[in-house]
Amino acid sequence: MKQAGEEEERTSGSEQERHDPGDEDGVLEESQPSSSKRQHKKRSKVSKVLNTLRGNEIPQSIVNHVVEQVKVDQGSASPAADPDAVRAALEQLKIMDVLKGKTGVAGRGKKAMGEHKFWATQPVPQIGEEPPSEDGYIEPTKAIEDVRREPYPLPKDFEWSTLDINDGKQIKEVYDLLSLNYVEDDDAAFRFQYSAEFLEWALKPPGYFKEWHLGVRVSSNKKLVAFISGVPTTLRVRENVFRASEINFLCVHKKLRSKRLAPVLIKEVTRQVHLQGIAQAIYTAGVVLPTPVSTCRQVNRGLSFITSYYHRSLNIPKLVDVKFTYVPRNMTLARMIRVYKTDSAPRLPGLREMEEKDVPQVADLFARYMQRFSMAPIMTVDEIRHLFLSGRGDVEQPCEKYRRPKQVLWAYVVEDPKEHRITDFFSFYSLPSTVINHPRHNLLEAAYLFYYASDAAFEPGVDESNNLKTRLVHLIGDALVIANQAKFDVFNAVTLMDNMSFLDDLKFGAGDGLLNFYLYNWRTAPLAGVNAVSDVEAGRGVGVVML
């Protein structure tokens, strides 16, 4: 449930709003003067915090503390330990995201840990529970005849709607809702811009259930004001394999955050999932909910099952111009451009775009490579075909400069020229963001690293040698080249799979975002994310890439 906790937090506010059919966008308007005063008071407090953090008023004690933490983690010689660089980085933080709990590291995220009344009623590990001695379900799977037959009731003036993703008009409604409300902070600089092609690719895997694409409409004018989705998947968590739903795109219109629609959406999609005989789910959120895969432990001030975002800058002038990044101390813009310059063409022999004929070999390579990770998806050949070929855009059109019209997914294989065997593959997807209120740029083109695999992982002594790391540096390095040639501005990755082995070598920089993974109705001990857990290296606990 991407940003599920964020939405649940937003729906728990005390401000009261009423539905007004005459509202200009058909949703809500402020109802009481007292509510307006409370809103103004809240905004004033937030403004004071923003003024303190965004200006030159960042306390030196905070800067010193961060510098010391960097020295502990990276050594005193690290360029990141420079006080001026730390202060500049703090000023670049997306403060509104932190205040609203998206990163899970601010006060809001900490406060949320004790205030999730809804999650206390759900079959999820609760905060403070000890790690389980054995993996397993929390509640047994319900018999179909025992599942509630009627949808959960909605507040007055709203009604349920099953979205038909095959209908262009309806998919545009989902696109409009997500584009304007999925990331809700009016002062932010960027907002996700989902395309219809992206949603079709993400929400229509083989065997999908249309009933799992749930919307809420205003009864009077049928305006779509909330959405949640699920798609079926098969998960392996350590040695256990089970069917699950992958919950995503939970979104409530920003004027309806006091209506508590998010918990009802979660309960209703859970009911629909139970009707298919499935009792488990996987979802992600930027805030700390009960509980990131069974337990929440402090490890180097982080959670044991958190992943963090890393960014590899490509279009330096644009990223600096829109304030996505900044020019560090003792470096000029021109030198920064040279440092982050990529090759003009991929270097790996045998690298080419994935084709239909490659599907069986890619499926086999994927299945074997995923065994490296504690939690990973198990995919059929049809699912592999959909995942890596259906998002290629208009294949009838020529692929100019590594990009086709309407393309959302890039998948490439490395073929041994002698044996015609697929030895490696990588993929990434496009998720641009609107640049809000900028005089020159209106779109930030972002690529996200998706799944990859290499048969170098199966060589004897792979964990002792650097062969796999070297291969992945070359493989993902070529992915950066292709993304740059395709005119992406930044390439993003998360600290899962084997990503930690190549992020530094390929000049990825740590962002300020964190991503928590959750399992619904399943207990398991902590898995390695940002940090190692037991003998499992950092990142290798997680082999699931959530869109």
Image (cartoon, helix red, strand yellow):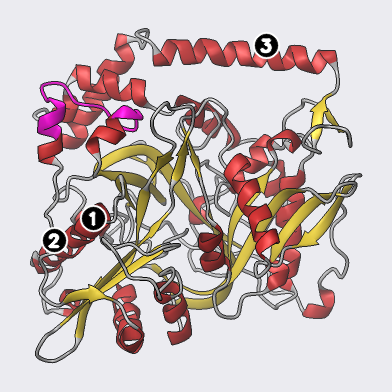
Q: Nearer the viewer, mark 3 or mark 1?
A: 1
- Tell me whether circle 3 and circle 1 mark residues in contact (CB < 8 Å): no
Q: Which residue is mark 3?
A: 41
Q: Which residue is mark 2?
A: 345
Pick the residue in front: 334 or 244: 334
Under circle 2, the secondary element is: loop
Q: Which residue is mark 1?
A: 485
Total of numbered circles in the picture?
3
Residues in magenta, as a range: 321-336
Q: CA distance from mark 3 to mark 2?
A: 55 Å
Q: Residue at x 79, y 38 (%)?
A: 259
Magenta region includes residue 324: yes
Q: In the displayed structure, does residue 467 sit left or right of residue 519?
A: left
Q: Quadrant of residue 344?
A: bottom left
Report the amino acid beneath label 1: Gln
| 462 relative to 188, above or below | below
Magenta region includes residue 215: no
Pick the residue in front: 392 or 184: 392
Under circle 1, the secondary element is: helix
Judged from this view, the residue extending furthest toward the front is: 397
**Mark 3 or mark 1: which comes first in sequence?**
3
Q: Quadrant of residue 399?
A: bottom left
Report the amino acid beneath label 3: Lys
Q: In the displayed structure, does residue 200 sit left or right of residue 379?
A: right
Where in the figure is residue 319, as x and y percent of width and height?
A: 30, 35
Q: Residue at x 31, y 28 (%)?
A: 321
- Tell me whether circle 2 and circle 1 mark residues in contact (CB < 8 Å): yes
Q: Quadrant of residue 428?
A: bottom left
| 383 relative to 525, above or below | below
Where in the figure is residue 12, as x and y percent of width and height?
A: 72, 35
